[in-house]
Image (cartoon, coloured by chain):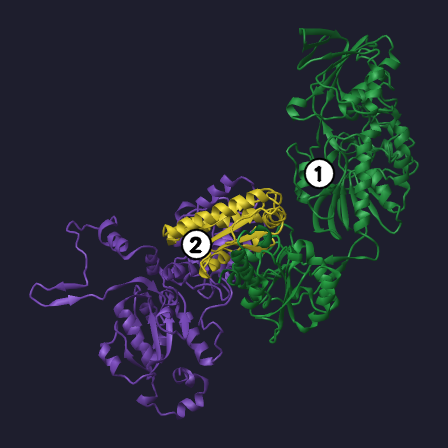
Chain colours: A green, B yellow, C purple
């Protein structure tokens, strides 16, 4: 049923400077179709548009037979809107790309053109004016993951003080992996010195709200209006009251190996994972705390600030925001460690001044190693890719070992060296004292010392050293799967998050309003992480501007309540969670619907219409193009 | 004027419709018999549309969607594929040559594939028509 | 027309004053074409309420119950019959002629039951040629013993002389509306007594639905089905079962359990009789008002929800899942094949 009883349909035919008219006989088209036609040499030129705007008010519905709608849609829309005609009462026939330019025979092309225009004419009779809506967008942002990428993104976003930034971190502290390193490659910058100021900054920003021990559990909504369900584990220490004086730690009777330090050091049941951690408040390991077993309250008694609270509970709450930035980092390939065999992240802690040995490179027996083998590419074969940053990190290790133990022999066993630009400078320096052995495969085992077997051009080689460091490959963090599931995102073949376009949208995920940065996207250096973080923040800022509203496409699906039988089949079919069941009826949230029409095609009651692609419009177009 | 078979192609806005535009820009010809109807997603195509096309005299119908796993709307193309599988079974049982319906995956950059698939399909339909299929 | 029949109910005062006259009785006829006889039974199932009605109607033709001949019908004035109830699809020349005759004599024709409404189960023979159909029925079904290959023929000579004829089969079983114009439809295989009474009530009220389907609901069975609440929001079916292949808990949505149930596309109003005995809906009450083709609509829905959970890009997985749907055409179109756009297309060719 058409919305107007009196339809006056006009057809504008574009010659396109001969591009169309040389292949399609437009006079014949005019004769064949039952509507007022106006042929112009070029519809899209200023003259053409002027001509259209002069005559268009005569019509209630307009068909433009021109080039591809993808190129010209916007231009015609503007002209039509200026003439106070609803743009959804028009239709574009793709006469150039999909007819003139792909046809050989003028007669056949003309026949095809006539049919395509007939399809449009029949279709347009069923077009209805659609109302374009704008909705308020929430300017706030949730950043998931408080590593270097998350923190830098949060800082960038919080520059605008009218915007709240929620930083969700699953650990009790922020700073990610970077803060646990001593120096950063390639310039050997001191990581804590570099990162402490931005971390302090982010804690001090009034419009950045940090939730440690927290994770996202559920997401609803899309760009402009997300609703996130957050769960936060109990910390038992009030971060706001605690000043980090250590009094509680001194009195705690429990001693445990510190997993954070790869068990190279002990900790208490109330502890800082490492010195200088931010926020500067300890956390209680509830499983090992003696409060529940023995009513031990030594820490509570020792705290003069009343910061310890055993009644603290796991809680869940909702956050509203307009955009989400994911920066949950990476993990490292789990290599087989031993007393003298170190994975690279463990070795980082050995090098760290706030680490278990205060930065001294010593063997478990306390002696200094006289020889160290740095074995590259641990896990590369299993992972199936080069992690690209480890070679440079290995150079850093070499440099730091040499600085501390100038007499220590250093061996690099590698397959390929990936050391571009600044990183090769570090290599040039390291190659003066370290030895490089190129090998396609290796085996490392502990036998009092460490034996490294490898194969080079001359055959099988054996190397006896005091210590070995295995450069663990970079891999997706274990929680990424859950995150991808919650946000309905795709993972790439290596298990990292897939972006919407590697080249042109490198920080946008496949869901509108969800961005990503850092190790969640793949192996990357600190500087790359920060680049991505700032780029992602920029994307958010450009989309969620204050006072501006988000356009809601009217070409979405709607349910006719009268026809809906409440059978609920649309609900599992909607890829955006836009279809919901309430009070025995299904409804579709227009702000979430993206207009794919899958539900309309599947609705058993034909109660759902895909606006602008309604069943009767498509039926009519089918009739027109075939008959 | 007998221009041979009429073939309706439902083209997804994000892949095959784009590929058809590219074929146009590159001036790669394909039979004029193909009449493209733009849909937001191959998942919008109802089996009724296909039968409707036949009712109106189409000799063949194509549904050209995004490759599995790369649907703009995540999984609309998979739904289109499953409907297509079942529809073919129904057509077969009803005595309509199932080869008159074809679903294929044509990515936005695959203008060559669009040209090849549609040319082959029109040829196939021509054969069926002359062979009484 | 039928106001005469039930008008008294509305206005009791008038009823008392009214003098019953033979000529005032509602003149009706009943006819069965290609059907199983269940629809005739359904009329008897109205039970005692039938007596109220019988008192007020004149049955001028009802082959199954009243001794009347075609010639009696021919003798009637045109449009004399107030209401003609026809059940069964039309599959031979005789039926075609009789319903045309009845149409001529009727003010209103009511397609009664699934077969008259949509062609019904006998309509599935449209999937085959007449020859293949006869071959199957007379020679190859597992229970057939016919070594002489005896086949009914249009003309047979009787042993004592003379001959008998059988009406030739039409190439297809047709819904009644394809042979004559139909005023109203009462769906069901067979229509329930409640549906019949409701249909009469609707007729009397004059508040006739746009699509002229009487006695049934315009919402689907799911809308009335108690199991609908068990339907999961993340519904996805990985494989399908025939009814005997799976035990279905009595409170679970059959379709969600993988048993093909046509409830989503079928009109309610049947009291969910099948569902209540743990059997899936087979679609006898016909499609919802906005559906163009019942089987295709169901197809689109079921194909969409198959493997909809974890959408695998693996085409073979989808093919395997779809392949577990046995006899889709017979299942999706159990009652409606002759009424389907696909069968109409085939018949037109």
Q: Nearer the viewer, residue A586 or A84?
A: A84
> Percent x, y for residue C287?
46, 63
Q: Residues within 10 Å of mark 2 (few under 14, many from 20)?
A: some
Q: Indicate the chain on which mark 1 is placed.
A: A
Splitting the image into 4 quarters, where does residue A587 fall?
bottom right
Indicate whether C149 appears above or below A299.
below
Q: Are marks 1 and 2 on the same chain?
A: no
> Percent x, y for residue C71?
22, 79
Residue under circle 2? C278
> Percent x, y for residue C28?
33, 79
Q: Nearer the viewer, residue A430 or A278?
A: A430
Q: Looking at this rendering, what residue extends furthest in the left direction? A: C160
Residue A381 appears in the picture as rendered:
yes
Q: Answer whether labels 1 and 2 touch (C-beta < 8 Å).
A: no
Indicate whether C299 appears above or below C22.
above
Residue under circle 1? A502
Q: Indicate the chain on which mark 2 is placed.
A: C
Q: What is the CA distance from the residue labelled 1 to the residue labelled 2? A: 52 Å
Q: Along the horizontal axis of the image, is A424 left or right of C262?
A: right
Q: Nearer the viewer, residue B129 or A471?
A: B129
Give the quadrant of the N terminus of chain A.
bottom right
Residue C258 appears in the picture as rendered:
no
> Percent x, y for residue A116?
56, 60
Q: Along the horizontal axis of the image, is A29 left or right of C150?
A: right
Q: Secondary structure at mark 1?
A: loop
């Amino acid at each position: 049923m058409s919305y107007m009883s009196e339809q006056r349909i006009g057809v504008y035919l574009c010659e396109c400077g001969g591009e169309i008219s040389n292949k399609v006989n437009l006079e014949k088209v005019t004769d064949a179709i039952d509507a007022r036609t106006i042929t112009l040499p070029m519809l899209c030129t200023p003259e053409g548009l002027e001509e259209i705007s002069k005559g268009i008010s005569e019509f209630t519905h307009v068909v433009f037979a021109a080039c591809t709608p993808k190129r010209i849609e916007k231009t015609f829309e503007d002209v039509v809107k200026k003439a106070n005609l609803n743009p959804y009462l028009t239709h574009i026939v793709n006469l150039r790309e999909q007819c003139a330019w792909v046809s050989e025979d003028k007669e056949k092309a003309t026949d095809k053109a006539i049919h395509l225009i007939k399809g449009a004419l029949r279709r347009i009779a069923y077009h209805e004016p659609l109302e374009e809506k704008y909705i308020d967008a929430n300017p706030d942002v949730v950043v998931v993951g408080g590593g270097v990428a998350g923190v830098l993104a949060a800082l960038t976003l919080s520059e605008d003080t009218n915007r709240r930034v929620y930083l969700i971190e699953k650990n009790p502290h922020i700073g990610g992996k970077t803060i646990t390193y001593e120096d950063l490659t390639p310039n050997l910058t001191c990581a804590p010195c570099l990162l402490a100021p931005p971390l302090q900054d982010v804690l001090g920003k009034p419009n950045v709200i940090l939730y440690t021990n927290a994770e996202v559990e559920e997401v609803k909504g899309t760009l402009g209006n997300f609703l996130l369900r957050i769960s936060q584990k109990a910390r038992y220490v009030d971060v706001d009251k605690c000043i980090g004086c250590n009094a509680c730690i001194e009195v705690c009777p429990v001693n445990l190996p510190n997993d954070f330090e790869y068990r190279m050091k002990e900790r208490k049941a109330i502890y800082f994972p490492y010195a200088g951690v931010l926020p500067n408040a300890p956390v209680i390991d509830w499983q090992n705390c003696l409060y529940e077993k023995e009513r031990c309250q030594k820490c509570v008694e020792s705290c003069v600030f009343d910061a310890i609270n055993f009644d603290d509970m796991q809680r869940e709450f909702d956050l509203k925001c307009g955009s989400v930035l994911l920066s949950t980092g990476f993990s490292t390939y789990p290599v087989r460690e031993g007393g003298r065999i170190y994975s690279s992240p463990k070795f980082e802690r050995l090098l760290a001044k706030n680490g278990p040995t205060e930065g001294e490179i010593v063997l478990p027996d306390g002696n200094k190693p006289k020889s160290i083998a740095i074995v590259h590419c641990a896990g590369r074969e299993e992972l199936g890719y080069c992690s690209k940053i480890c070679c440079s990190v290995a150079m850093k290790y070499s440099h730091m070992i040499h600085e501390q133990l100038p007499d220590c022999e250093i061996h690099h066993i590698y397959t390929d060296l990936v050391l571009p630009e600044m990183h090769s400078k570090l290599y040039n320096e390291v190659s003066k004292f370290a030895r490089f052995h190129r090998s396609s495969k290796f085996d490392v085992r502990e036998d009092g010392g460490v034996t490294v077997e490898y194969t080079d051009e001359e055959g099988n080689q054996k190397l006896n050293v005091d210590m070995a460091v295995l450069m663990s490959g970079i891999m997706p963090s274990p929680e990424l799967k859950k995150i991808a599931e919650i946000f309905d995102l795709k993972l790439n073949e290596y298990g990292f998050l897939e972006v919407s376009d590697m080249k042109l949208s490198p920080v946008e995920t496949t869901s509108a309003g969800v961005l990503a940065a850092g190790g969640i996207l793949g192996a990357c250096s600190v500087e790359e992480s920060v680049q991505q973080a700032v780029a992602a923040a920029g994307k958010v800022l450009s989309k969620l501007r204050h006072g501006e509203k988000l356009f809601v496409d009217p070409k979405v699906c709607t349910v006719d309540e009268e026809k809906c039988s409440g059978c609920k089949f649309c609900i599992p079919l909607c890829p955006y969670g836009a279809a919901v069941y309430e009070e025995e009826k299904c409804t579709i949230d227009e702000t979430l619907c993206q207009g794919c029409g899958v539900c309309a095609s599947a609705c058993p009651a034909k109660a759902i219409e895909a606006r602008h692609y309604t069943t009767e419009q498509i039926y009519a177009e089918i009739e027109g193009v075939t008959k | 004027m007998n221009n041979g078979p009429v073939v309706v192609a439902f083209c997804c806005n994000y892949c095959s419709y784009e590929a058809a535009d590219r074929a146009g820009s590159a001036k790669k010809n394909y039979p004029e018999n193909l009449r493209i109807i733009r849909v937001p997603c191959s998942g919008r195509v109802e089996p009724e549309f296909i039968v409707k096309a036949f009712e109106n005299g189409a000799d063949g119908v194509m549904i050209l969607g995004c490759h599995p796993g790369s649907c703009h709307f995540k999984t609309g193309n998979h739904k289109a594929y499953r409907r297509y599988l079942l529809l073919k079974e129904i057509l077969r049982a009803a005595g309509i040559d199932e080869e008159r319906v074809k679903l294929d995956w044509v990515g936005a950059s695959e203008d060559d594939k669009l040209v090849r698939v549609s040319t082959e399909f029109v040829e196939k339909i021509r054969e069926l028509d002359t062979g009484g299929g | 027309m039928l106001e005469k029949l039930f008008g008294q109910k509305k206005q009791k005062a008038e009823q008392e004053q009214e003098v019953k006259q033979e000529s005032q009785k509602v003149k009706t006829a009943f006819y069965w074409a290609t059907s199983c006889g269940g629809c005739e039974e359904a009329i008897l199932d109205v039970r005692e309420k039938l007596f109220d009605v019988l008192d007020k109607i004149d049955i001028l033709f009802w082959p199954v119950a009243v001794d009347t001949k075609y010639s009696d019908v021919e003798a009637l004035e045109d449009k004399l019959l107030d209401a003609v109830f026809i059940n069964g699809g039309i599959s031979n020349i005789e039926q075609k002629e009789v319903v045309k005759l009845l149409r001529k004599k009727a003010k209103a024709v009511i397609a009664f039951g699934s077969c008259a409404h949509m062609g019904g189960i006998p309509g599935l023979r449209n999937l085959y040629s007449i020859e293949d159909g006869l071959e199957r029925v007379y020679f190859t079904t597992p229970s057939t013993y016919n070594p002489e290959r005896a086949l009914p023929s249009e003309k047979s000579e009787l042993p004592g002389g003379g001959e008998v004829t059988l009406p030739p089969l039409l190439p297809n079983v047709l819904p009644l509306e394809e042979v004559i114009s139909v005023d109203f439809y009462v769906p069901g295989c067979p229509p329930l007594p409640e549906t019949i009474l409701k249909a009469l009530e609707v007729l009397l009220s004059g508040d006739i639905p746009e699509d002229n389907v009487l006695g049934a609901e315009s919402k689907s069975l799911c809308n009335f089905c108690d199991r609908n609440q068990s339907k999961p929001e993340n519904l996805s079916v990985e494989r399908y079962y025939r009814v005997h292949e799976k035990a279905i808990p009595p409170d679970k949505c059959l379709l969600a359990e993988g048993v093909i149930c046509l409830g989503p596309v079928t009109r309610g109003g049947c009291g969910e009789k099948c569902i209540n005995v743990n059997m899936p809906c087979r679609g006898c009450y016909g499609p919802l008002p906005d559906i163009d083709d019942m089987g295709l609509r169901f197809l689109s829905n079921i194909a969409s929800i198959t493997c909809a959970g974890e959408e695998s890009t693996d085409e073979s997985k989808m093919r395997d899942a779809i392949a577990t749907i046995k006899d889709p055409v017979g299942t999706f179109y159990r009652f409606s094949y002759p009424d389907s756009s696909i069968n109409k297309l085939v018949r037109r060719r």
